[in-house]
Image: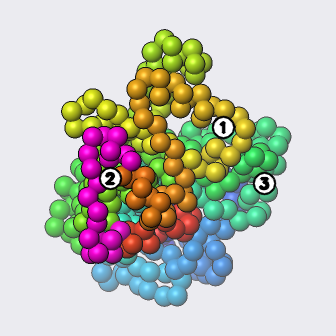
Amino acid sequence: MDMKFCSTTAFALHRVPPVVLAMIDDPIDLATRGGRYRFLACERPLGLLDKPLHVLSDTREGRFCSDNLVGHVCGLHPELGDFTELGSEMHVASPALTLFTMALKVDVITLAMAMSELCGTFAVCPLNPTLRAQLDSLIEARSLPELDGWRPVLDRSGRTTDLWHRPPLVTRSELQAFSERARGRKGYKSFVQALGLMCENAASPLEVQAAMKLGLSRRVGGEGVSPIYLNERIDLIRSARLMADKTYCVADLLMHSRDGSRSVIVECQSKLMHDNAESALSDATRLAALQSMGYTVIPITYEQLSDRRVFEQIASYILRELGERRIPKTERLVGRERELNAKLFIDWATLA
């Protein structure tokens, strides 16, 4: 039986670094009844997947559901959806098809967050202790291969974390093209709505949370600051180059005033990415260099972002620096903001 993983199961597989997949040495034989039984009987198949597993069926007659499997009927394959082979008789849906098949399972905000991850330069992959220990051993021996551009983010002790950097798996324009081909099919409306809310080129979960919190319209709980550019390159003038000892900086979130005369940069201060003396020094020199060029630079942490009262003051400051005034939210809009916060500020590893 050929298993074509889709929906949240495929999303989980797209989060797994290639080097980790290469380390999984359990033989998987889905061609036999016994092999399928052993695979599905695992508490977490491949040591990575939560059950039930979501798989695609080409016909309604072939759809099936159990405690371990949820079958989806897909009219998109082969004209819209393609698959990557993971092993014998095991395939994973493309990033676009993965997200489309998630549209009927998760809410629009969560789908937009998942889109932002696959369209970003990061992945969050929670690993079991065995796989993590194997990775740490390779890192300690300086023999961890960099496959397909995936690099682990290490903690202060040099150990692996759940966060990885990698090239984007799909682009917004590719998702837009996919949506045009999928017009009128189940999930289309939610997919298009999420596409309008997601952000591209984020380098961490905190950047997605900040960009959505600031950039989404007030009617869905955001602040309506638009447009927001993520990880934009800013070439430094000579004096700033000397100050920062580099020729350019990358702004986490960049916003401009309506007349273009003012610019605000929001720097996302993730503990994982910034919690050491070397990063603190680099952040300080970057901040000074950018401020010398007239940019208003505002560092923000997860705690500040997720605390509604604190964030209200930060949002007011950002808008003031952009030459605008923040209008206080009505009780209804505050309720929408609380709903958005409940979906945004989660343990990112549990997304979808």
**Which residue type carries mark 1?**
Ala
Is disc 2 placed on a helix, strand or loop? helix
Determine which residue is flagged by label 2: 215
Place residue 196 in its image quadrant: bottom left
- Residue 107: where, in percent of width, then height? 35, 72
Is disc 3 placed on a helix, strand or loop? helix
Determine which residue is flagged by label 1: 280
Mark sitting earlier along the chain (1/2): 2
**Which residue type carries mark 3?**
Gln
- Residue 95: where, in percent of width, then height? 40, 55
Mark sitting earlier along the chain (1/3): 3
Determine which residue is flagged by label 3: 134
Mark sitting earlier along the chain (2/3): 3
Label 2: how many residues lie within 10 Å, few (<14), some (14-19) or many (20+)? many
Residue at x 79% of width, y 47% of height: 157
- Residue 341: where, in percent of width, then height? 42, 68
Mark 2 vs 3: CB contact within 8 A: no
Residue at x 69% of width, y 40% of height: 145
**Which residue type carries mark 2?**
Gly
> Please, is residue 33 above or below residue 280 in the view?
below
Segment tinted magenta in the rendering:
317-337
The answer to whether residue 17 is visible is no
The answer to whether residue 184 is visible is yes
Query: Label 1, label 3: how many angstroms apart (C-alpha)?
Result: 30 Å
